Amino acid sequence: MTLKQLSVFLENRPGRLSHPCKALSEAGVNILTLCLADTEQFGILRIIVKEWEKAKAVLEKSGCVVNVSDVLALEIPDRPGGMESILAILEPNAINIEYMYAFTLKRGSNAVLIVRVDKPELAAKTLRQHHIAPLDTGTFFGLA
Amino acid sequence: MSTMPIHPDSYADFLTPAELHRIQLHRLQTVVRASYDHVPLTRARMKERGLKPEHIKTLADIATLPFMQKTDLRDTYPYGLFARPMSEVVRLHASSGTTGKPIVVGYTRDDMNVWTSVMTRTLSAAGLNKNDVIQNAFGYGLFTGGLGAHYGAEALGATVIPISGGNTERQIMVMQDFGVTAIFSTPSYFLHLIEAIEACGTGFKDLKLKVGVFGAEPWTDAMRAHIQERAGIKAYDIYGLSEIIGPGVATECCQQAGLHVFEDHFLMEIVDPDTDQVLPDGAEGELVLTTLSKQAIPMLRYRTHDITSIIAEPCACGRTIRRIRRISHRSDDMMIIRGVNVFPSQIEAALLKVEQSLPHYQIVLSRMGGLDQIEVQVEVTEEMFRDRVSALEQLQKKMSTAIEHVIGLRANVRLVEPQSIARSQGKAKRVIDKRKEEANQ
């Protein structure tokens, strides 16, 4: 029950971020949410889009190097301690969180947490045992 | 002739052409005979051409001999070209080769004496004598620069301070406190020293420094003008290479108009790098050197890949040994970084080791604080791109370590976006050298 995330390599200098964004907007691809990791020399743009295969092709055609990875999308209550409940499940099971980012839903009072872990299968199974189901693609884009 | 007092060894700089040619021919015949008898590679190549040592009857006959290349030293690593047993070899030096293994050169006791003598003549030509206090900032160690210059300066009778390279603060302190009159270093390091001296408010007028002997890397007349003006000294260019002897192959005199080659020990030819034909005096081509007196590793017609031309006109200093023009460029893609010879193919080999397939890359050379910096830009491919920052940083480190392992110098690896390295006709320009422009500023 994982979601596809696209990662794009960027050099850390002015103007580099607009290149992939422009390619996507010209192709009519809407970025649902994103996260930018950066070091002194380079950055990684991570995006969630509905049609990831199309977006990947568009980005590659525009000269970007793209990596596809599986992430978990978890719906959590948008209130203090909402995220903590997730960590409380993953951490004791030796599942390492590599990074995460979140966004709030337009409707309702929940937020969605995008989590990249080292063992996605185990993480999904463990979460389900705790009655937290990672969102599948259909449900995810239905909510967003 | 100059009124400058010279060292007795320097009399060989003033031989008549007839005397010089007689010495050269005798030494050439001796070195060809020794190579034929003791170096299997040379003997095999001469036999292939039906050549015997006794076929060398005139100096012009040298053109019949096969060339030697840097790869010959590499292929016979470490001692394959040695013509004397190790019991007669008293010194080894090494410089970087093309595969990570260095090139090893050896010296007999007589070779050491010749090396010392040509370095003494070099320093004497720069106007130095026993009254000078010399700060030798060439690197000591396997590199031939430091010890070669050291022995020459000592034989001159000068006071030698074996400070080696680096530690700028200490260099300045020594220069001030020890009453240094001459310094040996790479020109780029001296540029750095100039800035440091000016920054600390010492100023050159309070120093006794009057001469700089610079070598081990290419530099320009613009750099010389800059150094002489800022430091108020005379800056001399010297030329040499480990394969031939180290520093001491050629030097400028007080005229600073080309470098006198010590022709009694090194026979020079200029050849067309494409056709291998010997070119006349004045024509630009590749410098080819034959060691006339070297015993441990005699080199016959060694291709230096340095581009220059012979100045046959007599020099105002009175020396009769001919000059070559300052080396302008090379016929191959060898880079000289911090005095170390580096080929792009070495960096390529290191990158291949890490990634299995060769990414597009570019080597950017620059200079910071007088020291050469190497940046290797590598275009990220789908195969090497990972979603995690730590994985990419690890990849950079792996590439950097692999390069350092091969060339012996630290290189900063920078990952860049695909297609960001400019290509002309589909081929990327491998080396961008920003050092010259920076030095001229």
Image (cartoon, coloured by chain):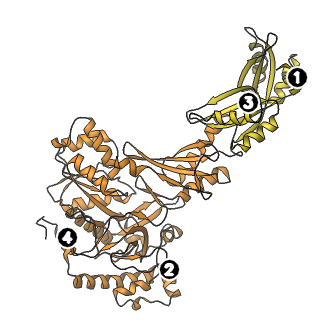
Chain colours: A yellow, B orange
Respond whether the residues carrying marks 2 and 4 are from the same subunit. yes
Disc 4 to disc 3, how far (Cα)?
74 Å
Q: Which amino acid does label 4 sit on?
A: Ser
Disc 2 to disc 4, how far (Cα)?
35 Å
Q: What residue type is labelled 1?
A: Thr
Residue at image mark 4: B10
**Callout 1: residue from which chain?**
A
Q: What residue type is labelled 3?
A: Ile
Using the rendered view, name the quadrant where residue B345 is placed: bottom right
Residue at image mark 3: A47
Q: Where is residue B430 in the image (x, y as percent from the top left)?
A: 54, 55
Horizontally, residue B152 falls left or right of residue B336, namely left
Q: Do the residues labelled 1 and 4 touch (CB within 8 Å)?
A: no
Disc 1 to disc 3, how far (Cα)?
18 Å
- Of B185 and B321, nearer the camera is B321
Horizontally, residue B202 falls left or right of residue B39, namely left
Give the SS element for disc 2: helix
How crowded is the residue under tag 1: few (<14 C-alpha within 10 Å), some, or many (20+)?
A: few
Q: Where is residue B47 in the image (x, y as percent from the top left)?
A: 51, 87
Q: Tell which circle, 1 or 3, labels the residue nearer the N-terminal end.
A: 3
Residue at image mark 1: A139
Q: Which of marks 2 and 3 is in front?
A: 3
Q: What residue type is labelled 2?
A: Pro
How crowded is the residue under tag 3: few (<14 C-alpha within 10 Å), some, or many (20+)?
A: many
**Callout 2: residue from which chain?**
B
- Of A134 and B41, nearer the camera is A134
Marks counted in the figure total 4
Residue at image mark 2: B40
Q: Which of marks 2 and 1 is in front?
A: 1
Using the rendered view, name the quadrant where residue B117 is placed: bottom left
Horizontally, residue A102 falls left or right of residue B51, namely right
